[in-house]
Image (cartoon, grey):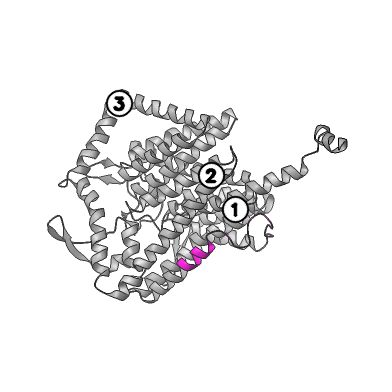
Amino acid sequence: MGIILTLDILAIAIVAFTARSKGLENALPLAAFLFVVFPEESKIAIPGLFDLTTQRIIVVTLFVLCAFTRKPNGLVPKRLPLAGGIVILSLWWILSAANSVVFTVSLKYVLSQILDLFLIYYIVARYVTKTRTVRNILCGLVAGVVVCCVFGVLEVYAHWTVMSLFPEMVHRSGTSGRVYVDMARGIRAQSTFGHPILFGSALAMAIPMALYLVSSTRKPAQKLLLWSGLLLMFVCIYKTSSRGPWLALGLSLIALLASSKTRVRKYLIVVCLLAAFVLVARPGVWQTIQSDYLSTMNKNSSQGESYQYRFALYSLAAGELGKSLPRAIWGYGPESFFFLGIVGEFNGRMMSYESCDSSMAALLIETGYIGLTIVLLLFYKALRRTYRAYRTLPSPENAICMIFLVNIATFCFMMTNVAIFGWGQENIMLWIVMALAMIYPYLVRSERAKKSKSKPVRLAELTPILVH
């Protein structure tokens, strides 16, 4: 408890001091860094009420600072993008919670989503006024993931986890405070995240960010730091032994290779050549990947069952919702899956479904068909607006939009692979990226408009007017 209280005080002091000395906007990159680094286990439990996590304390600190900061005008529309969808989703969750089989659990979950994640979206979307800040926030997120990679490397090679410094906690992925050991895959890098696949998901989002940053900086020292961070991230995403993040990252890099300009494409080719060199120099790496693929295709292996389990969840969800029309509409209540005690057939045997390794299936069971549809429409709108910004903004300003696009798409893909939605640092990363993606086009246009107004008129431009 002492270490957590100390960390909380330090987090508040650092964020508040930065906001006071440099402004709230310049404190957001630091907050982004802290959001990623601190684990869910860094919290003070208030019995009967809620858990005061370090992330939540930082959000409250930022919100209080907002009260003493003047809102910027003219940069973003008065009604924030996606605000309508977020409000509709919140109202639907409240309705679903009101009819939940575990009312208290569902209500706490809804309040945590609104006050934590949605509030972060609001703060970032409302108080970022410069494109430079957008880049700095990405630097904060990448720096946070790199620090987590240092912890991940220590787990794998030194068999020590930083989570041993925090109080032990039993959550949906197991017991914290120990090195994560898989019977089939050995030690898996987890760092400060709730599960190796969640860490892998954050890495699949951070690596494209780092590639963008290294391609857009000209300072040798920054390039060296970013390339070192990229090396650590590639090592850790491999050591998570998580197939979903591997595939998500591969698809993201292919999208970047097809859409990016010469410099990013050059760096991607370098990455591919380094990967090929590693596969040749270390045949065990290729053998591990091949073994994971063959095990995934084998229904009788633990990895094969894990793969099949995700598909079985959708049939399970449809069956549970088919028992009652009201439940099909609003589900059994947010965060209720673990209390339903569902028993069903899987691979020819009856078993108890104690985990839901798919956020899509979880949303379906917990919030009904309408709840899942609202979430999907919200993500669709975010993806469509981001893609439109990529197509309409001038180069090179539009390059960062493709990073936002692959990040949001990566998260959506991972929602089909794991219970990723609604908890963990990767969710905070998502909502920060969503906020940046929505306001970035307005910031670019505003800055270009200011430059055009302040640009001095040349004599050659006045000559046709004077002659006329």
133 relative position to 273: left or right? right
User: Decide: marks 3, 1 in contact (CB < 8 A)?
Assistant: no
Mark 3 and mark 1: Cα distance apart in space? 44 Å
In the image, which disc is placed on residue 282? Answer: 3
By secondary structure, the bulk of the magenta-drawn segment is best described as: loop
Disc 2 crowd, CA 10 A, few/some/many (<14, 14-19, 20+): many
Query: In the rendering, at what x and y percent does residue 324 appear?
Result: 27, 74
In the image, which disc is placed on residue 390? Answer: 2
Confirm whether residue 149 shows in the render. Answer: yes
Foreground: disc 1 or disc 2: 2
Q: Secondary structure at mark 1?
A: helix
Mark 1 and mark 2: Cα distance apart in space? 32 Å
Write down the residue under mark 1: 15
Q: Going from the N terminus, do you reach mark 3 or mark 1 first?
A: 1
Foreground: 148 or 398? 398
Q: Secondary structure at mark 2?
A: helix
Mark 3 and mark 2: Cα distance apart in space? 39 Å
- For the image shown, how many numbered marks are present on the structure? 3
Disc 1 crowd, CA 10 A, few/some/many (<14, 14-19, 20+): many
Above or below residue 203? Residue 425 is below
- Identify the magenta region: 70-89
